[in-house]
Image (tube, rainbow, N blue to C red):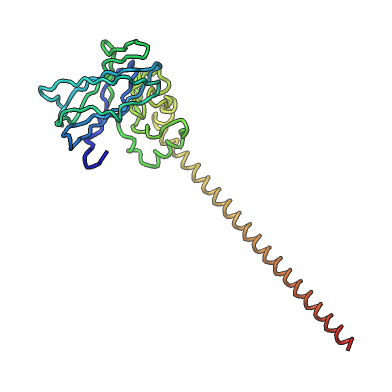
Amino acid sequence: MSESRFNRIKFVEQTKVSPSCPIDIDKAALVLDTTENVVLLQLKLINIGSKVISSVFLKVLLKDAANDFIQNSQPIEHTYNDLNMLPGDKYGEKAPIRLLREVRNVDVEVSKIVYEDGEIWKSENEKTEQIPKLTKLDILGNERISFLKSTLDLNSYDHTNLRYIPVIQNSSWICTCGRFNYNTNLVCKRCNISKEWIQSNFEEDNLDKNYNIFVKQMKEKAILEEKIDQEKKLEEEKNTELKKRIKTRRLRIVSISVFALLVIFSLGLLSTN
């Protein structure tokens, strides 16, 4: 996308979720298309269920800059067909939804899902849960965020999911990626981080305590590494000095030997004369 044509208006944070829905809205963004003079809604959908999904039906409620519903506007009904979304697959970022020019906020609802085997999931009568306003992880500072990243396996977890301060509630928890989970979910349904990791790093004063332990260990490690480096440097200096002495001694031996040979050769010449 050309920066001169497409300008991002904002990222849209989800305020409610249907926990039973097999499609998760990981990200949503409003983008202004200055050429077509329309607003585009870009979504990142993830199949967090266990079955292959062929179609996703969405309802998009349109709001203005004051977060009020736009008068005389109808919700946008949009369908993604022929998806063949396997469990864990992502879709939507390259298939934006066209909206009105004045739209500055939206509520996105997954109304219906069709599985590959023909089974249908509908949002009707499904329970919805409110997502509280979340605090961005940036408030912790770069050092603590780096510490949190160091406790996660680079090969199994995408660090870009570290976005918010998690929220632990009576019957549910909000993951650092922003996903709502019931307490029965031992791992996040979106990013697969464990609830145990969330609790051990964020509950009460665990983050400060673990971070301080980490800092102390890093300082001790740095002191030890510096000591090893100094010992190694001294050993290298000793070896260099020893090599110089050996080289000097050899040169002296060679010089004495050459001088002795010259003396012997000179005496031999004198005796013949």
The residue sitting at 66% across, 60% down in the picture is: 239
Quadrant placement of the N terminus: top left
Residue furthest out toward the left: 72
Depth check, front residue: 198 or 260 = 260
Residue 39: horizontal and vertical position, in percent? 19, 31
121 relative position to 262: left or right: left
Answer with the quarter of the image where residue 134 lies: top left
Depth check, front residue: 220 or 248 = 248
The residue sitting at 39% across, 27% down in the picture is: 191
Disc tally is: 0
The residue sitting at 37% across, 42% down in the picture is: 142
Depth check, front residue: 31 or 175 = 31
Residue furthest out toward the right: 272
Answer with the quarter of the image where residue 147 lies: top left
Residue 265: horizontal and vertical position, in percent? 83, 81
42 relative position to 71: left or right: right
Residue 256: horizontal and vertical position, in percent? 77, 75
100 relative position to 111: left or right: left
Residue 218: horizontal and vertical position, in percent? 49, 43
Quadrant placement of the C terminus: bottom right
The residue sitting at 85% across, 85% down in the picture is: 269
Q: In this view, does 224 lie above or below 12?
A: below
Depth check, front residue: 206 or 138 = 138
Residue furthest out toward the bottom: 273
